[in-house]
Image (tube, grey):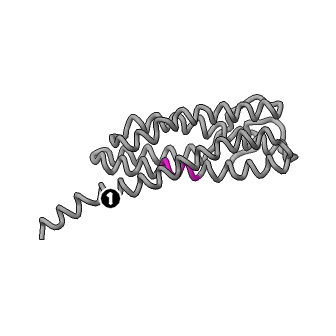
Amino acid sequence: MVQLSERPITNKITNLQQKFIYEINTMFDAENRFLEAQQMMWQCCQNNKLKTVIEPHIQETEQHIKNLEQVLNILGEKPQRITCDVASGLISECQKFTLLAADNPKIVDLGLAEWHSKIEQMEISCYRRLIKVAEQMGQNQVVELLEQNLHQEEQVAQKLDQLIMQLLQEVKTPEVKSNAKAR
């Protein structure tokens, strides 16, 4: 349980604007964490198709961070990374998995693609919710910036979903052949 004294901001959250700023700052932290994780994923994966999905998304994530900085600037705030425990947990689980599967590069690639997909789904959910709140607040510029991020996250998620099916087949195929020989 988090203690009130451990909160990263000094004031209580008493209105929608403060809640929104808090959530933008947690998303700012998440995007920064995901940027580092994507760089690690790119280094760990051996599948070229997966690398071609991850590599451009690294630059997009850098832009997502800039967009969130702009959002906070529009709201008259400075960016501050408020720990996003969900992002931290997803990355930690991915790192553990990668270490445990290190002896099988195809399994590592499949796992990295799946974890990246989980991350994208989390981001999509957060951006959709943030956009709805920004719309209710009448923050049209903010909506635009968040929609840019959302659109890119949705595109990457779609690419990953397709790639996961291919990677799954690649992982499965040798097992089928070796089982057939054993008979």
Q: Position of residue 165 (x, y in %)?
A: 39, 58
Frontmost residue, 163 versus 133: 163
Q: Position of residue 75 (x, y in %)?
A: 82, 34
Span shown in magenta:
115-121
Q: Is residue 127 above or below residue 60?
A: below
Q: Is residue 87 shown left or right of residue 130?
A: left
Q: Quadrant of the C terminus?
A: bottom left
Frontmost residue, 93 versus 131: 131
Q: Which residue is mark 1?
A: 169
Where residue 144 sits, quadrant-wise, is top right
Residue at left offset 66%, top offset 41%: 148
Residue at left offset 18%, top offset 66%: 179
Label 1 sits on what residue type?
A: Gln
Classify mark 1: helix, strand or loop.
helix
Residue at left offset 84%, top offset 51%: 136
SS assignment for the magenta stretch, majority: helix
Residue 119 among those drawn in magenta: yes
Q: Is residue 144 shown left or right of residue 91?
A: right
Q: Is residue 104 shown left or right of residue 150?
A: left
Q: Position of residue 89 (x, y in %)?
A: 54, 47
